[in-house]
Amino acid sequence: MLTFDIKNSLTTSSVATPASRTATLTTSGVDLRGYIGPVQITQHIGVVSGTSPTWDGTIEDSADNSSFAAVSGLAFTQVTASTNLQTLNVDTRLVRRYIRYVGTIGGSSTPTFNSAVTMIGQKATI
């Protein structure tokens, strides 16, 4: 029998620690085994610099934590300015077992993004 204790079964994870980034960010895979329903991925963007900087955040999934592919409909709105916070809900039943975040940087003259990515979701207790 599964029981749900919202206070004690929410798990928060740092998918990508806060850092100043000048190249594309590809995180390690996160194992969704044990999560119930959606998890929420939050993309935190702080200070942005450079000429015409762009940041495109997407979610990819994988069955084996090795071969990943973009998930249709799981992309954040492109970021071009400082101080941006966005969230996506990922239904764990509709993606493969592992997910990862990819943040692609574009622009010229050394675009830099201070960023972090977090995930929160509910795990089952048996």
Image (cartoon, rainbow, N blue to C red):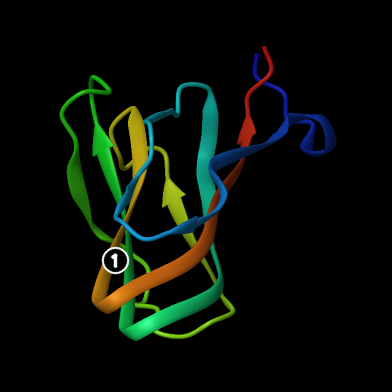
- Between residues 83 and 3, which one lies in front from this camera angle? 83
- Between residues 122 and 24, which one lies in front from this camera angle? 24
Q: Position of residue 42 (x, y in %)?
A: 55, 58
The residue depicted at 53 percent of the width and 22 percent of the height is 34
**Which quarter shows the C terminus?**
top right
The residue depicted at 31 percent of the width and 42 percent of the height is 94
Give the left or right position of residue 68, taking residue 55 as reference: left
Give the left or right position of residue 45, taking residue 78 as reference: right
Q: Position of residue 59 (x, y in %)?
A: 32, 51
Give the left or right position of residue 124, taking residue 59 as reference: right
Examine the rendered structure and indicate whether residue 108 appears above or below residue 57.
Answer: below
User: What amino acid does circle 1 point to?
Assistant: Ile
- Between residues 51 and 99, which one lies in front from this camera angle? 51
Q: Secondary structure at mark 1?
A: strand
**Which quarter shows the N terminus?**
top right
Residue underneath mark 1: 105
Give the left or right position of residue 12, taking residue 26 as reference: right
Regarding residue 94, the answer to whether it shows in the image is: yes
